[in-house]
Image: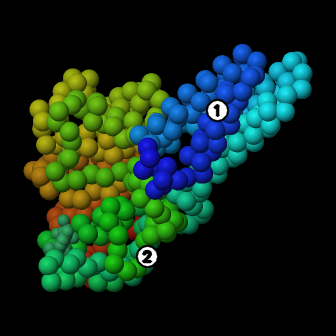
Amino acid sequence: MVYCLVKKPTPITGLLLLIILNRAILASLDVPYIIDMGSKLVIALSVAALILLIIWGYHGVLPLLFGIEIGGGMGQVFLVAVWGWNLTVLLSSIISMATGMLGVSIIMNIESEHQQMIEADGESEYVIEVEDVYKDYVVGNIVVHALRGISMRVRRGEFVAIMGPSGSGKSTLLNLIGALDKPTSGKIYIDGVDISKLDEDQLAELRNRKIGFVFQMFNLINRTSVARNVELPSIITRMPKKKRIEKVRKLLSILGLDEDAMKRRPIFLSGGQQQRVAIARALMNDPKIILADEPTGNLDSKTGKEVMEYLKMLNRKLGTTVVVVTHDRSVAMMADRILHIMDGKIIREEYVGDGYGNE
Ligand code: ADP
Ligand code: MG
């Protein structure tokens, strides 16, 4: 707590301290019983809010508290009117109304800034734009040039495959697009937002709300049920419970998994089923983009094709933009467009079908 107040003072912790101080003065004076009680309650609530703020970060406690401040201040004005003129109570009520309103406005500002940062214009035709991106990995005194000047764009609702031999930089590129890592140089725009401008919290928010990841190894949690695995991303975004459960059911049924499979732990399902669970999980927050890194790499070719069919269906039906990394030509052929990558560069672009998503 001391750490938070001293090292990371924010306007909100400052305001909370002001509330506590204001009410402490009031509580220590000879004021009517009800004001005294109210002050003690507000002190207790503010201390609780400070502690919660430190443990959880901002979690909705504060708007309530600042709301109480505004209400409390108005209550005091009323009491002054009833009980007669009292300078301390009057000053305290003005301070509490002002701090309450200031607090609410700070919170509203933080919220809207947060939204604005990850919610760009939405006008741009491209949901992914990569501009001259380089990525070096430094291992000891060796520098690996994983990406050497990649530029690419993906339209909304497009299905793109990135193909290339092992070590050509496919995963590196996908991780950068997914904001899991930062480029050494160059720019990446997701949904029109320059992601180099976002801080860690905003990046986490962007990943959670806009991007669904699917990996070769499925990355499911085997300690818990399939349903719970799928539900997880929506718990983080605080989706209401009822909606969560409905959505889990709907997604799993779209992906051909029944009630029985829902209750099992992922480890007891086949590889193809596990990958479909991972896709359902990736879809839980209605992402605009699905990024899949060798999603069929651990599956036999028939099951792999099936998983790709599901991705394709979601792309067509929900309009989700899909980027699939693969080194398998038959997998890549299911996309609208294939980007061939070699030694960290795009060497060729290939349109599949008529280039409009029809085969
Ligand atoms: P692909 O997915 O196409 O197989 P990667 O993107 O994984 O290729 O890797 C591209 C190059 O970058 C390879 O030479 C790989 O060894 C190197 N590389 C990838 N990740 C790292 C890392 N975290 N540290 C060092 N080198 C890495
Ligand atoms: Mg890879």
**Ligand 1 - quadrant of the structure image:** bottom left
Q: Quadrant of the C terminus?
A: bottom left
Q: Residue at x 46, y 56 (%)?
A: 7
Residue at the far top in the pictured view: 33
The kind of residue on which mark 1 rests is Ala
- Amino acid under disc 2: Lys
> Tag 1 or tag 2, which sits nearer the N-term?
1
Q: Secondary structure at mark 2?
A: strand
Q: Is residue 122 visible?
A: no
Query: Pointer 2: what residue?
Result: 187
Image height of 33 relative to 357, above or below: above
Tell me the quarter of the picture where residue 162 sits.
bottom left
48, above or below 344, in the image? above
Q: Position of residue 311 (x, y in %)?
A: 31, 50
Question: Which mark is drawn over residue 343?
Answer: none
- Whether residue 300 sits left or right of residue 219 in the image: it is left
Answer yes or no: disc 1 within 8 Å of ligand 1.
no
Q: Classify 10 Å Cα crowding around label 1: few (below 14), some (14-19), many (20 and above).
A: some
Q: Quadrant of residue 60?
A: top right
Residues packed near mark 2 inside 10 Å, few (<14), some (14 to 19) or many (20 plus): some
Q: Residue at x 34, y 34 (%)?
A: 231
Identify the residue shown where x is 22% and y is 82%.
145
Q: In the picture, which quadrant includes the N terminus?
A: top left
Query: Which residue is more in the foreground, 7 or 345?
Result: 7
Q: Is residue 122 left or right of residue 286?
A: right
Q: Residue at x 76, y 35 (%)?
A: 92
Which quadrant of the view contains residue 97? Answer: top right
Q: Nearer the viewer, residue 47 or 12?
A: 47
C-alpha gap between disc 2 and disc 1: 52 Å
Query: Looking at the picture, how far across and down is residue 299, in whole percent?
Result: 12, 50
Residue position marked by numbered label 1 in the rendering:
24
Residue 24 at x, y percent in the picture:
64, 32
